[in-house]
Image (cartoon, coloured by chain):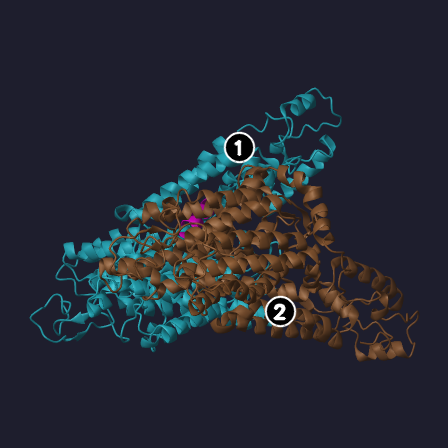
Chain colours: A cyan, B brown
Amino acid sequence: MSDTKPIIPPSRNESEEDIESLRKGSKKNVSYRSNGDLIPNAGKVELDPSQPFGMGIINDIKRTIGTHWKEEMTIFNQKTIAVSLLMFITVIAPTLTFGAIYGTSTGFSIGAVETILATAWTGCFFALFSGMPMAIMGSTGPSLIMTTVIYEMSKTIDVPFLTFHAWISVWTFVYTTVTALFDLTRYVKLATKFTDDIFALLIVSIFILNAFGSPFGPGGLLRYLDPDNKSHSDFQLEYGDEYIYLKSAILSILIGLACTATIFALRALKASPFLCNQTVRNSCSDFSVTVAVIIWSVLKNVCFPTVKVEELNVPDSFEPTYTCCNAECTAYFPDECLDVTAPAGKRAWFADMMDLNGKPEVIGIAAGPALLAFILFYLDNGITWHLIYSPRNGLQHGDAYNWDLFLNGFCNLINGLLGLPWLVATTVPCIVHIDNLTEKDKNGNIISVQENRLTYLFSHLLVGLSLLFLPAMKLVPMPVLLGVFLFMGLSSIGRIDFWNRFLLFFQQPSRYAKTPFNKYMKLRRVHLYTVLQCIFFAGVFMVQNTKSIAIAFPFMTLACIPGRLYLLPKIFEGWELLLLDGEEEEIKRFIEEKESVTITVHSGHDNNDDEESDE
Amino acid sequence: MSDTKPIIPPSRNESEEDIESLRKGSKKNVSYRSNGDLIPNAGKVELDPSQPFGMGIINDIKRTIGTHWKEEMTIFNQKTIAVSLLMFITVIAPTLTFGAIYGTSTGFSIGAVETILATAWTGCFFALFSGMPMAIMGSTGPSLIMTTVIYEMSKTIDVPFLTFHAWISVWTFVYTTVTALFDLTRYVKLATKFTDDIFALLIVSIFILNAFGSPFGPGGLLRYLDPDNKSHSDFQLEYGDEYIYLKSAILSILIGLACTATIFALRALKASPFLCNQTVRNSCSDFSVTVAVIIWSVLKNVCFPTVKVEELNVPDSFEPTYTCCNAECTAYFPDECLDVTAPAGKRAWFADMMDLNGKPEVIGIAAGPALLAFILFYLDNGITWHLIYSPRNGLQHGDAYNWDLFLNGFCNLINGLLGLPWLVATTVPCIVHIDNLTEKDKNGNIISVQENRLTYLFSHLLVGLSLLFLPAMKLVPMPVLLGVFLFMGLSSIGRIDFWNRFLLFFQQPSRYAKTPFNKYMKLRRVHLYTVLQCIFFAGVFMVQNTKSIAIAFPFMTLACIPGRLYLLPKIFEGWELLLLDGEEEEIKRFIEEKESVTITVHSGHDNNDDEESDE
């Protein structure tokens, strides 16, 4: 779109008369520099220059672990402990949930023990060796669906699932290594805030929906009101009463909401005059989630020991989930051998790579699904890394997409060989992690981020240790964790610019937040941009929540990138995209240029005021 | 206590060294005016001068209705409608609750219809003719207990209750008239903020406790969890299931809390950028209670029509509650005549004054309990009027204790003759009324109060009209009204200085609010005052919540006045009492005097700073 058309800076509250008078030159000192002229190539998104073979990885290592490893391993303070505990709680609950679903989706070849083990060792490994230790690896929806698809395939072609899964892991490792060596990760860096925000809002909205009870999935506080809720089934049978589940429902909902309220209250203490000094107040805020979980778990167990509520779905002991019918372990006990009275043992930890049921071509066939799995890893990791390691978040230690993608391929190879699930970067734990390591001033501007590896390491060591005291974890009621998730969702959503811009639809223009785009752009242009973003969001949201096509969700997210690259510049001018979607430094430069022009054009005429008179 | 002792202004953060150095004159320009010298007679409470016979009433009439009546009857705006609706909701629910208790306490001689009728006509009468139209008349606990005692007495001496009740009303009218004529109401004006705050905190805490479910009384949201809750009994029988009450409990608690949250959210809109302009935002805030009650009543009835929750205990039709066994109406149908199959009718509206069961001496005996009832009226009215018509609340139109006490005696005379309950000034509706007619600036300072008679009149006309559409009122679930009460309690408690001073115990001294007493007094003196207030509060609270002695509650409150007059001056100096308990204008004068002295003594040395370093 033209950089030539507007001669007058179209500051939005100028009436037609103002513009007319400016055109006639009736005001003095009119500047003829348009907004489009202020910053050359404003709003353009450009591909990073490619690096020679292998140098992408080497540069990544030099820039990150090569420079900051020691520093990141030695920052130890109260925040380290607080955030480690917090991350343990944040990570363990979804891990167990995913573990349960993996169990039913893979005929119990992969279960909760496998999921915990994979999360623990991969987490520790990444904490020590990855280039981006702020990004947390874990189970995600798309990898779960991918694994389910592979399980169905293995049944169709009649090879043992774990063997097939292991061979696919080998191929995936090859793909990720090649991608990392050729520095192909730079393509995912074409994403801008436009894409990041859509993705972040999607993830956060799912978090909030799931905590309350999403119409698209199981679980959630309000779901306890459903008499058919799976979690009621145990004690329903036990008591044989039609309405007893309501006792569980009422207690679950109340302790869930109370836990959320407790966390918010403890965090609010930080800025309050209560308690004896700021150190104590900061501690209350830092440990808010841990304290709230402990308080409500204890209250539940002490005050209402007889009312059953959903517990964490914890396995009984630390051994593979799969129970064998026979010594060769070819069938699952008891479902597949009802005539056998006792299990023959557990599966071996290592998948038998050569147990191909006489079909060596399967090794080659595995390359196909491996490509799909690889694309999934590439996208899921890439988008999350981009969201977390954006300059907006104030991280200083640099990114390492190539190195971390290679490591991720390597870890998933090991996971494949051991019959553990594949892990990728998980958005919400990442946001929680970085959010709790960030110090902000009173206006919400970032002062500093405690970039470190210890919180990641300690929290995942705790996940590993939890394998040793599995029964103790049953004392934490599930609704309390849903309360934590609700808190995480609610406290994250205000960070998302897209969401804040969406809220403008319901606000009085004169009361809009004083953001650069509100100040310099016409309001309906801002709204148009938000509407477009909503359309992309709706697409991604629909794919994510339609079971049959949910696996395409990362591709849909990816589709936002060309949308931003090719569609948006046809509708918006470069400087508009800069204000809405650019880096903060460029926006600052634009404002400086703009102010120096505006002052001479119509000094004293500030926009969007002359209101408030309706008070 | 001495005005002579301290030579140095004992500003609280002066260390011993400072004081020592001041004594030695090592600092220049030391002033020798002590805090006690700044304002003569600081902290003294004095009785108003007495007015000649009858002049108290006449002056009251001249000052209030004589001067402001037309103005108060003609201010009509949106607030008038909003507050009228709000007051209707605020008044109708306790009226119905009290009506139900009156029924069981007086053998159904007085019931809900009588209570509504008394509230409606007395309210309209006071709105039109009283001197203090901001104070709302209604049923209160002490008058209920008093009436119960009289009912028991009438049984003992074997005269019809309503006749006895009517004769007591006649005597009470005599006492109140004499009191008003001799201007004896000025004694209750000896109460200061010390007493007002204790009384206000008591009433507000009872409100909050009752909304949640007080350990001392029936009702409250959490009480629905009790399977034996009276409100469950109807449909428990109907369904015959042990656990179905939980459905009712869960819905009740959720809609109650949701109603409170909705009201707070709607009120928060006022200062937000949401909605199209300030007028709409103000309307949302003004009508918040009405809108929330409507929303949650509709949601309950539309979404959960089959789940029963407690309804307002509304009578079926507008006629006296008492159903007669026989034509003479000497016994209650059906309890007292189980052999009679159909009621003979209702009692007559007017009590038969001469039906003394052959005991004319009862007319004289009635003078005894009438004295007790009179003292109750005197105290209950007096304390509430003092709380509401305090200069702190920004009311400009003056008070009229004598005239209104006379009117109250008159209305209760009529109520007695008609067999309706006695009414007195009710604290919480008064606070809600004045609070919602007050405009405040952003710092919470009062800008103006819309003093008027229309809100009082309209709301009580609505109460009267409700007698015509009684069944429709059953659509409002009781939990929604408990949610409203919870909101009222929570939004009032922050207004009470005593409560805010109590919270200081849990705060860091350097973060204390910058009130005059925190600034000029030693902290432990402030805390000592709060502790003393807590002791008085505990006494009043215990009496209020012990059924057998609850009738003495107004006397206990009264005991705070001599406590303030004779005990506190022995412990605190005059200027300290002035800062903690004085009128705002006097405090301002003290600060002005103080600042002019302090500047010369140690300029630049401000107290309670040099902290915050622990941030």
Taking depth in this image into account, of A9 and B434 the one nearest to the observer is B434
Amino acid on which disc 1 is placed: Arg
Instruction: Please provide the residue range marked out in magenta.
Output: A193-204
Label count reads 2
Instruction: Name the dominant secondary structure of the magenta segment.
Output: helix
- Residue B122, how many percent across, how many down? 54, 49
Taking depth in this image into account, of A579 and A44 the one nearest to the observer is A579
The answer as to whether the residues below labels 2 and 1 share one chain is: no
Q: Is residue A241 visible?
A: yes
- Residue B500 position (above or below residue A24): below
- Residue A133 position (above or below residue A567): below
Alpha-carbon neighbours of circle 1 within 10 Å: few (<14), some, or many (≥20)? Answer: few
User: Is residue A195 covered in magenta?
Assistant: yes
Residue mark closest to the camera, 2 vs 1: 2
Q: Which residue is mark 1?
A: A524
Viewport quadrant of the N terminus of chain B: bottom right
Separation (CA) of disc 2 from disc 1: 51 Å
Q: Which residue is mark 2?
A: B502
The chain letter under disc 2 is: B
Taking depth in this image into account, of A155 and A576 the one nearest to the observer is A576
- Residue A141, how many percent across, how many down? 32, 55
Left/right placement of residue B198 relative to residue B118 reads right
User: Is residue A214 covered in magenta?
Assistant: no
The secondary element bearing badge 1 is classed as helix
Taking depth in this image into account, of A155 and A335 the one nearest to the observer is A335
Residue at 67% x, 48% y: name it: B441
The secondary element bearing badge 2 is classed as helix
